[in-house]
Structure formats: structure tokens, C-alpha cells
Image: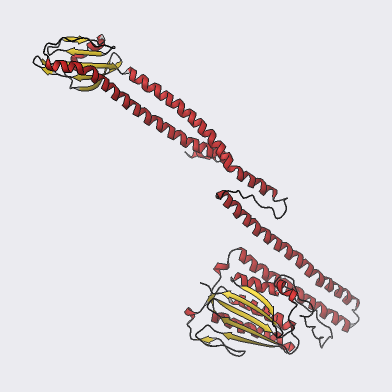
């Protein structure tokens, strides 16, 4: 069986559909012909028995009332024979070869039989009427060859008709398969054209709401996601190239200048310090790019649902740890960083800058979020770190982590200058930075007198948004009316 199936795999889908449907139709037609032949044989045999009964009935009726009848021969070439109780043939229109077999029929039980005489088959009806003279035998016969001719002719007609239907069905299957696969051919041609077509090209979706339309819509969605991913990667490479070009050019210039000031120790030290600042900036940019790439790669791989669930208390502990790390950076600028932990309803109270989260809820009853400790650390460090970099000396930052029945909310507020309103819509895009109103000019280094390069990589808030969206949440930013900036991240409770 497999030897016949394997070659079919090499054929086109249209050919396989046509061959398969035609083969099924052929089996059905053959079964129908056989059933109809059987029915015709049964009907013809029944009709013959009825005719034979009609041939024999007049003689049977006569013999039942008359022991010495005057029998007249039948008409219309009917084959009838009457045998007396003594074995004499009183009437016969049978062929001689059939007459020779009448002796055996006188002892046969009444009914219908098929006998073979000299190679010919006859269907006979035998009746045994009884009168005063004794037991008579009436035999009516018909040549069975006529039945076979009728059945064979009808079978031939049915076979030719079935063959014609099968050919017509095969042609119809080919035409219908061609019509059904026409949208697939259009999709294939369009897919071939996508490599040179405009980037917004899509596979055609037919008007019918069928499987092919669903396939086209699914593939279009896939192409859109692929196109977006490609566009993001292209934009990221372009932006990264732009961001890397400036510090690399500055670093090259500084090294060239340092090579010219090899005899001046102070100038050489200043060039080296500036080069170190640029190397640090390049390192931050590379780390941020790697972090963002890993987050987006995990999203594309569908790992969001496989993230470990963290309780509110676990994330609160990480908030405190992250705030302590930010304080180390803020201490160089005399910026105060506080935190406030607001536990879920029923908790024992909020923490403070020196407190810790606590509550009466057991860990099993706490809300859980698809955000791990590393993700929370990135959120606090990036948002609060940006705020510390933007604040002047003596500023303040407040980090709040609270819980509601629907989500956990991380909010970072500072009392700095805020950002231009035009920056708010694009704040979470890659490589975007506010203008100088948000940037504080760093103080000169007391040892060298040099001023470090201001500004970060422009990826901090992009990482914040990526972490929030990976947890199923959102990130937003707004200027506070009283002054400062407020960044809010909401992470839904995992159901």
C-alpha cells in the first residue's frame, strides 16, 4: 500500500485531490452498479416467477376439478407441460431436451427451480394438482438465458453510465480544486513578490470567511510582527551607530591629543580622565543595549507566561535594596532618596526610608506579579537613577511601591525641573533625551578640574517600558504641577 502512496506525494496538491476524490467516486459507483445489478436480478427473477405462475395456473385450476380434461395448448410461445398420474405427457410445448427431463420433475416438490439441460438453464415452476385420477404434474418453463441477457445489457449500460459519470466527476474535481487553490496561488505569487515589494505589502485576503482567509490573515499578522521586529532592529542598529559614533570620535580625538601631550603630565592626566568618561559611557550604552535586547528576545520567544511569580513583599524587599544602591550614587550630589511601601489592604502599615514592609497577610494570600526581583531592580535603578542625574544638589527622590486589588504600582517622584511637554509622548522611545532643561550640569572634578560628559544612553526609560510590558503592565510619565517629574509603572496581579 505504501508503494502506491509514496509516488502520490510527488504530485501537486490539485492532482492528489483529483485522484483521491475520483478514486472514492469510482468505489462508490462500482458499489452502486453491483447493488443495482443484484436488484435487477432479483426483480427479473420475481417477474419470471410471476409469468410462470400465470402460465401454469389455468391448467392447475382445470385439473383440480376435472380428472379427464381436454387440454388445449398455450399460446404466445409459452412452455408448458402436463404429466398425468400415470407418467404420460398429456400436453407439452417444451423443447425435446426439456421433455426428457420431465420425469425427474414429477417427483420434485412444488415450487420454482432452475434446471440445466444440455448446457442451457431454464427456470421452471412445478405444480402438483390432485383430482380423482390422482396426482398430476404441471410444469411451466422459461429459458433463463433471456434473464441473463437483460441483466447483462443493463449491467453494461450501468457500467458505461458510471464510467461517464466518473470521468465527469474527475474533470469537475480538477476544475473545483483549481478554483479552490487559486487564492493559494495568488498568496504564493504575492509571497514571492514580498522580497522586492514595498514593506507594507500583504497577502491578499479573499471575501469569503473560510480557512484560506484565516490563513492569509494569520500570515499577514506574522508578517506585520516580523516587519515590526525588523524595523526595530534596523532602527536600533541605526540609533546605536549614531550614539556610538560621537563618543568614539571624541575618544579618538582625546587619545590623539594625549599622544601630543606626553611631556605634560597634567594635560595627559586630563585627557586620560576624559577618555575614561567616554569609555564608561560606551560601556553603559553597550550594557543597556544588551539588556533591552534580552528583554525583547524573551518577549518574542513567548517566555512571559513562564516568568516566576513574585509576591508584593518580595518585590518590596527588592525596592529597598535598589534604593540603597541608588543612594550611593545620590550621596555624591547630596540628593535624598526615600521610599514608601504601602502594603495591601489589611497590612500592618507602610514602610519608610528606614522601614521595611510588613503585614498580617500570609505569603500565600499575597498578590503575585509576573515580575521578578531583577526586573524590579531595573525599574527602580533606571527611573531613580535618571532622577538623581537630573536633579541639582539638595534635591529629593521618593520611590513608592503600593498594592491595589488589580495591580501593583511603582511610582518615582522627584522635585527637579521636569521635562518639556513635547518630550513626554516619546520619553520611553529608544535614544530619546530631554533638552538641557532636564539635565543638570555636573560639577568639575576636584582632582582634575574637568567636567564629565552629561547625559546617559537614552535607553533607561526604554528598558523600563520593556520590563513593564513583559510583566503585562504599563509605564507612564508626567510633570508634576508643583514641580518635578513622576514616573509610574503598573503591573497587573497575576490571576
Left or right: 400, with 442 as reference point: left
Query: Residue at 50% across / 79% down in the picture?
Result: 366
Q: Residue furthest left?
A: 132
Of 319 and 435, nearer the camera is: 435
Q: x and y percent of residue 118 in the render?
A: 29, 13
Please name the residue shown 35% across and 26% down the image: 40
Give the camera-side residue of 469 and 291: 469
Which quadrant of the structure image shows residue 69?
A: top left
Question: Which of the 4 image quadrants contains residue 50?
Answer: top left
Q: Is residue 55 above or below residue 477?
A: above
- Nearer to the camera, 150 or 232: 150
Q: Is residue 261 left or right of residue 83?
A: right
Relative to 418, does residue 287 appear above or below in the rendering? above
Q: Position of residue 168 (x, y in %)?
A: 51, 31
Coloration mode: secondary structure
Can residue 106 be seen? no
Relative to 264, say whether 244 is above or below. Answer: above
Amino acid at each position: 500500500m505504501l508503494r502506491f502512496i509514496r509516488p502520490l506525494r510527488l504530485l501537486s496538491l490539485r492532482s492528489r485531490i483529483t485522484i483521491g476524490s475520483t478514486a472514492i467516486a469510482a468505489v462508490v459507483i462500482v458499489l452502486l452498479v453491483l447493488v443495482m445489478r443484484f436488484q435487477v436480478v432479483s426483480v427479473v427473477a420475481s417477474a419470471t416467477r410471476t409469468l410462470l405462475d400465470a402460465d401454469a395456473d389455468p391448467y392447475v385450476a382445470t385439473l383440480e376439478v376435472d380428472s379427464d380434461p381436454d387440454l388445449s395448448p398455450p399460446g404466445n410461445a409459452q412452455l408448458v407441460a402436463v404429466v398425468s398420474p400415470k407418467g404420460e405427457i398429456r400436453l407439452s410445448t417444451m423443447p425435446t431436451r426439456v421433455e426428457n427431463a420431465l420425469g425427474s420433475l414429477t417427483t420434485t416438490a412444488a415450487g420454482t427451480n432452475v434446471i440445466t439441460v444440455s448446457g442451457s438453464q431454464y427456470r421452471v415452476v412445478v405444480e402438483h394438482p390432485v383430482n380423482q385420477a390422482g396426482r398430476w404434474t404441471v410444469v411451466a418453463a422459461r429459458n433463463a438465458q433471456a434473464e441473463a441477457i437483460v441483466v447483462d445489457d443493463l449491467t453494461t449500460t450501468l457500467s458505461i453510465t458510471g464510467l461517464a459519470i466518473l470521468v465527469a466527476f474527475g474533470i469537475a474535481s480538477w476544475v473545483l480544486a483549481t478554483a479552490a487553490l487559486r487564492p493559494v496561488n495568488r498568496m504564493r505569487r504575492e509571497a514571492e513578490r514580498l522580497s522586492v515589494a514595498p514593506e507594507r505589502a500583504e497577502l491578499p485576503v479573499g471575501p469569503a470567511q473560510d480557512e484560506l482567509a484565516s490563513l492569509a490573515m494569520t500570515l499577514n499578522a506574522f508578517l506585520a510582527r516580523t516587519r515590526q521586529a525588523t524595523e526595530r532592529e534596523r532602527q536600533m542598529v541605526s540609533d546605536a551607530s549614531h550614539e556610538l559614533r560621537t563618543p568614539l570620535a571624541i575618544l579618538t580625538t582625546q587619545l590623539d591629543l594625549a599622544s601630543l601631550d606626553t611631556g605634560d603630565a597634567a594635560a595627559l592626566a586630563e585627557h586620560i580622565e576624559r577618555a575614561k568618561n567616554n569609555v564608561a559611557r560606551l560601556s553603559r550604552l553597550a550594557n543597556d543595549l544588551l539588556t533591552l535586547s534580552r528583554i525583547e528576545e524573551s518577549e518574542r520567544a513567548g517566555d512571559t507566561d513562564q516568568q516566576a511569580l513574585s509576591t508584593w513583599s518580595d518585590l518590596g524587599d527588592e525596592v529597598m535594596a535598589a534604593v540603597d544602591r541608588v543612594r550611593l550614587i545620590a550621596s555624591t550630589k547630596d540628593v535624598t532618596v526615600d521610599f514608601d511601601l504601602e502594603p495591601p489592604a489589611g497590612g500592618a502599615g507602610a514602610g519608610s526610608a528606614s522601614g521595611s514592609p510588613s503585614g498580617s497577610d500570609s505569603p500565600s494570600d499575597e498578590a503575585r506579579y509576573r515580575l521578578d526581583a531583577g526586573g524590579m531592580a531595573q525599574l527602580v535603578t533606571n527611573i531613580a537613577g535618571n532622577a538623581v542625574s537630573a536633579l541639582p544638589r539638595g534635591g529629593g527622590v521618593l520611590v513608592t511601591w503600593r498594592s491595589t486589588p488589580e495591580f501593583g504600582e511603582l511610582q518615582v517622584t522627584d522635585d527637579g525641573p521636569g521635562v518639556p511637554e513635547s518630550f513626554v509622548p516619546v520619553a520611553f522611545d529608544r535614544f530619546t533625551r530631554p533638552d538641557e532643561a532636564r539635565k543638570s550640569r555636573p560639577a568639575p572634578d576636584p582632582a582634575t578640574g574637568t567636567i564629565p560628559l552629561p547625559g546617559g544612553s537614552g535607553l533607561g526609560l526604554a528598558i523600563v517600558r520593556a520590563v513593564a510590558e513583559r510583566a503585562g503592565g504599563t509605564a507612564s510619565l508626567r510633570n508634576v504641577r508643583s514641580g518635578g517629574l513622576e514616573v509610574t509603572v503598573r503591573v497587573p496581579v497575576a490571576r
